[in-house]
Image (cartoon, rainbow, N blue to C red):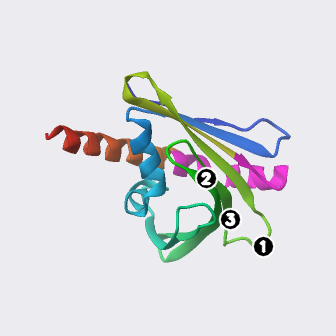
Amino acid sequence: MKNKTEIIAEPGRQELFIKRVFDAPRELVFRAHSDPEIYIQWIGPRDMTMTIEQWDCRDGGSYRYTHERDGHKYAFFGVNHEVLSPERIIGTFEFDGLPERGHVILGTTEFEELPDGRCRVIHQSVFRSVSDRDGMIASGMERGVNEGYEKLDEWLAGSRSDAAGN
């Protein structure tokens, strides 16, 4: 059964939600969000190359990574406010490609344990303005989220096979 990613962006609101169930234990899904060697394998669209420049996944730690396509680099960075394994990650997210700074997104990602070794991820992004949120959606964010979660499904399936000794 293929799990579907749900992106909820109500008109006129400064927030959006991304919800997705994964066929893997919560601890493993959390690790895929917090371990840079795993994160680099799945985040973002398939046609982009990712490079992690900085990664400190702990309370107060910061990160910076780039996606590259056709010689164009797109940098993303932020600060982790809370990293509570395996329950949630709260932090900021910024895109370095905007003409001015200050378009900070506050993100909360929660990892909910489900029966049968599954996990639901619920991510909430709160934007500075409705236009910031709508601009992110218009930028192709949905494609990046969907392709990234497909790659995460593939990684999770492979790691479960490895753990089972197959």
Left/right of residue 104 with respect to residue 20 in the rendered view: right
Q: CA distance from mark 2 to mark 1?
A: 20 Å
* Pointer 1 local density, CA inside 10 Å: few below 14, some 14–19, many at least 20: few
Residue topped by disc 3: 94
Question: Residue 10: which quarter of the image?
Answer: top right
The disc labelled 3 sits on which kind of residue?
Answer: Glu
| Magenta segment boundaries in residue numbering | 125-145
Q: Secondary structure at mark 3?
A: strand
The disc labelled 1 sits on which kind of residue?
Answer: Arg
Percent x, y for residue 91? Answer: 66, 57
Residue found at the far top of this picture: 115
* Pointer 2 local density, CA inside 10 Å: few below 14, some 14–19, many at least 20: few
> Circles 2 and 1: CB distance less than 8 Å?
no
The disc labelled 2 sits on which kind of residue?
Answer: Gly
Question: Is any part of residue 5 visible from this angle?
Answer: no
Q: Which mark is residue 140?
A: 2
> Circles 3 and 1: CB distance less than 8 Å?
yes
Question: Residue 124: which quarter of the image?
Answer: top right
Percent x, y for residue 136? Answer: 70, 54
Residue topped by disc 1: 101
Q: Main secondary structure of the magenta part?
A: helix
Q: Secondary structure at mark 2?
A: loop
